Image (spheres, grey):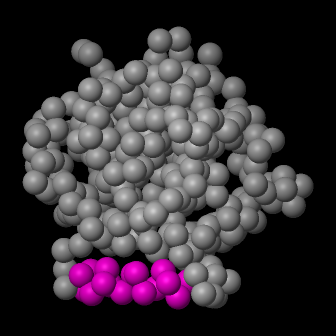
Amino acid sequence: MPPSRSRSSTSRADPGLHPAPPLPEGRTVELAGGATTFVREVAGPRGAPVVMLLHGLTAVADLNWFAVFESLGTHFRVISAEHRGYARGPALVGRCRLEDLADDAVAVADALGVDRFVPVGYSMGGAVAQLVWHRHPHRVAGLVLAGTASVFRVSAREHLLSRLLPAASTAARARPSTAGRYVGSTLRARFAGSPHARWAVAELACHRPATMLAWAAALARFSSRSWIAGVDVPTAVVATSRDVLVPTGRQLSMAAAIPGARVVHLDGDHGVFITGQSAFAAALVEACTLVTSTG
């Protein structure tokens, strides 16, 4: 039977004014040390492999994954958790470190009684997924890396922009309303004409622009090039074929560096999870099946 889907009573948007897409029920989960995060879960078939969805930089978890819960939940137990520093994620304490997000993912698995799982990361979430394997290899059954890379700061322009991010984050703290008009503006535009546009705007309004810019600076510091070739679990890379934000060539170079990695080509740009929802869901199902199949 397909998994049931229902609109969570914990939605941040008023469903009367901001109709959300159907989402699995969500709840707050307490992690070790007393921190909490917000989790959505689809039980999937009995004994199904567990996949954990790790969202990107500017899309909160629901925005990144709303189109894939049903398709993935037909085959897998699906867990989606919000990163720290985001509205319903653990509180951000100190400097933004992607390593902390990787540890948080394992803490969520611990709280839910999950031993081994497949981190499924999109964009920044893909960097986090790589770090989950690097820091906790015994917990990782496979990897699905979508719209992501092993390094995000390569060109001279990218190096320049990364040096400006800390100052931009400081400025955003001083003028959050002004910064909020720009952080997430691309995602808001992609929902234009959608019946869920107001919901998306309400979700994005929960962003703290300064925190998003601080995470962007952390992503600019990330590189797995020195250890990515050591990945020893089944891996699938979902490569977005018209991506300019994370260039497709960079995604494919990462795939080539991982022994035995399979590539699933997805026709779309970096916003394909909004503009190509069906294709995005199908690509993730294919990728997750590739890394969990025993045949």
Q: Report if residue 165 lies within the magenta region.
A: yes
Dominant secondary structure of the residues highlighted in magenta in the image: helix
Where does the image place residue 7, in percent across and percent down from the top left? 76, 40
The answer to whether 108 is drawn above or below residue 177 in the figure is above
Looking at the rendering, which quadrant does residue 152 occupy?
bottom left
Where does the image place residue 2, in percent across and percent down from the top left? 62, 22
Left or right: where does residue 26 sit relative to residue 137?
right
The answer to whether 35 is drawn above or below residue 94 in the figure is above
Residue depicted at 29% across the width and 35% down the height: 136
Where does the image place residue 256, in percent across and percent down from the top left? 12, 49
Q: Which residues are magenta?
A: 157-172
Hey, which residue is sitting farthest top in the picture? Answer: 46
Residue depicted at 84% across the width and 52% down the height: 15
Left or right: where does residue 208 sit relative to residue 117?
right
Q: Report if residue 25 lies within the magenta region.
A: no
Q: Nearer the viewer, residue 70 or 83?
A: 83
Residue depicted at 76% across the width and 49% down the height: 11
Q: Nearer the viewer, residue 293 or 215?
A: 215
Residue 87 visible somewhere in the drawing:
yes
Q: Give the quarter of the figure containing the N terminus.
A: top right
Looking at the rendering, which quadrant does residue 282 occupy?
top left
